[in-house]
Amino acid sequence: MHCDYVDGQLTLDGSALAAIAERYGTPCYVYSRAGIEARFRAYDEAFGARAHRVCYAVKANDNLSIIRALGRLGAGFDIVSGGELERVLATGAPAGNVVFSGVGKTAAEIQRALAAGVGCLNVESAAELARIAAAAAATGRTAAIAIRVNPDIDAGTHPYISTGLKENKFGVPLDEARALYRSARDNPWIEPRGVACHIGSQLTTIAPVVAAVREVVALAGELAAEDIPLAHIDVGGGLGIRYEDEQPPAIRALVEALLREVPAHYEVVMEPGRSIVGECGVLLTRVEYVKSTAARNFVIVDAAMNDLLRPALYDAWHEVLPCTAPAPGAHTLECDVVGPVCESGDWLARGRTLVAAPGDLLAVMSAGAYAFAMASNYNARPRPPEVLVEAGGPRLVRARERVADLMRDELERLSEEEAPK
Ligand code: LLP
């Protein structure tokens, strides 16, 4: 995606963000279809002639138009809930290209996945394997599975998004994985298809992922010797993006490093989310007030933690740019950019130097992943619309929620005694 100033106006792939804000209002998410597709292709092409499936991690951004666009390019999908499965199926993507991850799959979700023909269930515990076997026997369909191994490797990322340490809830230790594969082999309803790992998200170095993949490849080798041949190695997702000054490895460099670890007879499955959509989205927000106190200047905008939770939850840094380039020498403000929600933790950016006045339009950058997807209705705030900039220009791909939508499914019932006379 190309986000730059043209004649003083911030544009995304040639569309002026101010015009999009004018048309669809603020706050508003805007994504670049070209950018998303280019990153998917970068993964796909990095594998060259090696057998592979790039399964986009839907949780990063589950907008149907994005799922559909990636599906058209041949993407598979990594899902973590029945809801994500329905979203993928609604776009017409084949279930066979789906891998189902997650520690808490319900019996109903497993049954639905089997009935739909999901390609592989990534198993996270012995109890889950038993549940899958029971569901498979009940539906009369063999379940293809991979065991998600927890290699106890520090991914060196934020503790909330680190998943490959033994104290994390994810995966099973290597020893237990061996035992689970043996019981899977002996169960006629289970087909051990692969082995999986995913050690964390927003990874900025390659070494921990390579170490994890080395472990699972070794395990697959041992299993083959025990007559449990596996067809694929699922190396997870996790590649980081640039929010501030991070220097994550290039997609190609990561894929090439992983391919060096995986013998060529395995298909490589990969589950990238953030690195496909993260840098390809912005959140547009308008300044409502500038409030100066003895301690701080607050730029109060119309987007809040309910729209973009990452700063409040992870202390995450997102760049904030004015949509109109400030005049040279314009008065700057040392400020915190905060929302209207009634929490002191409701901030989008802190300690910034900005030119900002009421009515100004700001763009919060790198907001394509885990942004709208984590939005809530806290403070009875409807979620923002989503706009996809395509070759033909911007297109609304999700309308702004209305307050009526928030109240629609609520049952307001007073008991007899309380009913108004
Ligand atoms: N595969 C599995 C099993 C995962 O748990 C995840 C992410 C992915 C793939 C995709 O990882 P990615 O390529 O996007 O890093 N909300 C957090 C990120 C949570 C990631 C959860 N798992 C954030 O905003 O930073």
Image (spheres, rainbow, N blue to C red):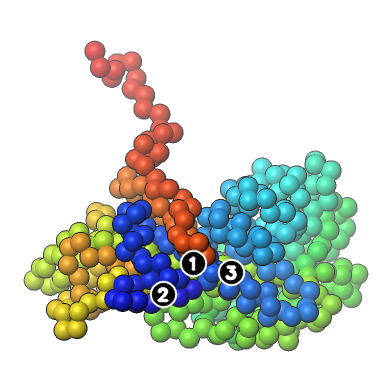
Residue 35 in picture, x, y percent from top left? 52, 71
CA gap, disc 2 and disc 1: 9 Å
Quadrant position of the C terminus in the picture: top left
Q: Residues within 10 Å of mark 3 (few under 14, many from 20)?
A: some
CA gap, disc 3 and disc 1: 9 Å
Element on which disc 2 rests = strand
The image's mark for residue 338 is none
Residue pointed to by mark 2: 3
184 and 361: which is toward the camera: 361
* Kind of residue sitting beneath label 3: Glu
The image's mark for residue 32 is 1
Note whether residue 283 is visible.
yes
Is residue 109 left or right of 65 when viewed as pictured? right
The image's mark for residue 37 is 3
Is residue 214 left or right of 59 when viewed as pictured? right
Q: Residue furthest left?
A: 294
Element on which disc 1 rests = strand
Q: From what the image shows, is residue 211 above or below residue 165?
A: below
Element on which disc 3 rests = helix
Note whether residue 311 is visible.
no
Residue 223 in picture, x, y percent from top left? 84, 72
Q: Residues within 10 Å of mark 1 (few under 14, many from 20)?
A: many
What residue sits 70% from the left and 64% below the top? 74
